[in-house]
Amino acid sequence: MQPKIIVSTPLFEIIINRLCQQLIENHNRFEESVIIGLQPKGIHLANRLTKRLQQILNVSIIPSGKLDLTFYRDDFRRRDEILIPNATEINVVLENKRVILVDDVLYTGRSVRAGMDALLAFGRPKDVELLVLIDRRFSRHLPIQANYIGKMVDTIVSEKVKVEWKEKEGEDRIILYSKSDK
């Protein structure tokens, strides 16, 4: 299978705007809500969402943070490579807040589970929602589902979804490829 672009730059921007509008519907001006990006890849989406929300709502700050889940992963000690922890930056009290966990791709659900465990070390939120750019529907190992979904993609285990960011790879797009593709 040749790599296939499933979301191009124009559609990528539409998805980001739609997700922001859905968040505004449920969180109004974010007085009691916090956006938390899961390290390493969810932070790109969380940053993009907070910047766009600031523009739409004409506010200077949307409460947000970055959460590292390295030591909360269930495969932490099973991996061959050594995992280097990322920075956690949560400069807001999460107690009784509405938290939106943000990740790029929802696949097995294990990263989200680890993120929820890590999140509880910072307090007890009023509730927790999940926002993902891509939901790979048929691969769940845990009963986790997103509240906000950019795009659902039906994939098989031998396929991989890669999100590319303008800030990092020079272009916003989402690519589907098989593990044998380079």
Image (cartoon, rainbow, N blue to C red):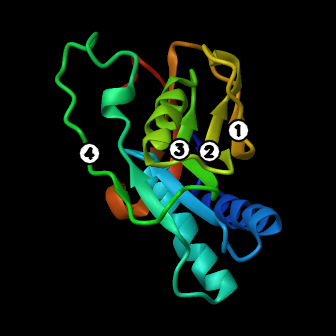
Question: Circle 2 sits on which residue?
Answer: 132
Q: Earlier in the sequence, mark 3 or mark 2?
A: 3
Tell me the CA gap for discs 2 and 4. 20 Å
| Residue 79 higher or lower than 10, as above or below | above
Tell me the CA gap for discs 1 and 3. 10 Å
Q: Which mark is residue 97?
A: none
Q: Nearer the viewer, residue 93 or 78?
A: 93
Question: Circle 3 sits on which residue?
Answer: 103
Asked whether the beta carbons under mark 1 and mark 2 sit within 8 Å of each other, the answer is: yes
Q: Taking 126 as reference, is 113 left or right?
A: left
Asked whether the beta carbons under mark 1 and mark 4 sit within 8 Å of each other, the answer is: no
Q: Earlier in the sequence, mark 1 or mark 3?
A: 3
Asked whether the beta carbons under mark 3 and mark 2 sit within 8 Å of each other, the answer is: yes
Q: Which quadrant is home to the C terminus?
A: top left
Q: x, y percentage for residue 170? A: 36, 61
Q: Residues within 10 Å of mark 1 (few under 14, many from 20)?
A: some
Tell me the CA gap for discs 1 and 4. 24 Å
Number of residue marks = 4
Q: x, y percentage for residue 102? A: 55, 49
Question: Circle 4 sits on which residue?
Answer: 86
Q: Tag 2, which secondary structure?
A: strand
Q: Tag 1, which secondary structure?
A: loop
Q: Which residue is found at the position 59% from the left and 54% from the top?
A: 8
Question: Circle 1 sits on which residue?
Answer: 146
Q: Nearer the viewer, residue 106 or 74?
A: 74
Q: Which residue is found at the position 49% from the left and 65% from the top?
A: 64
Q: Earlier in the sequence, mark 1 or mark 4?
A: 4
Q: Which residue is found at the position 66% from the left and 34% from the top?
A: 135
Q: Residue furthest right?
A: 25
Q: Tag 3, which secondary structure?
A: strand
Any part of residue 164 in sight: no
Q: Earlier in the sequence, mark 1 or mark 2?
A: 2
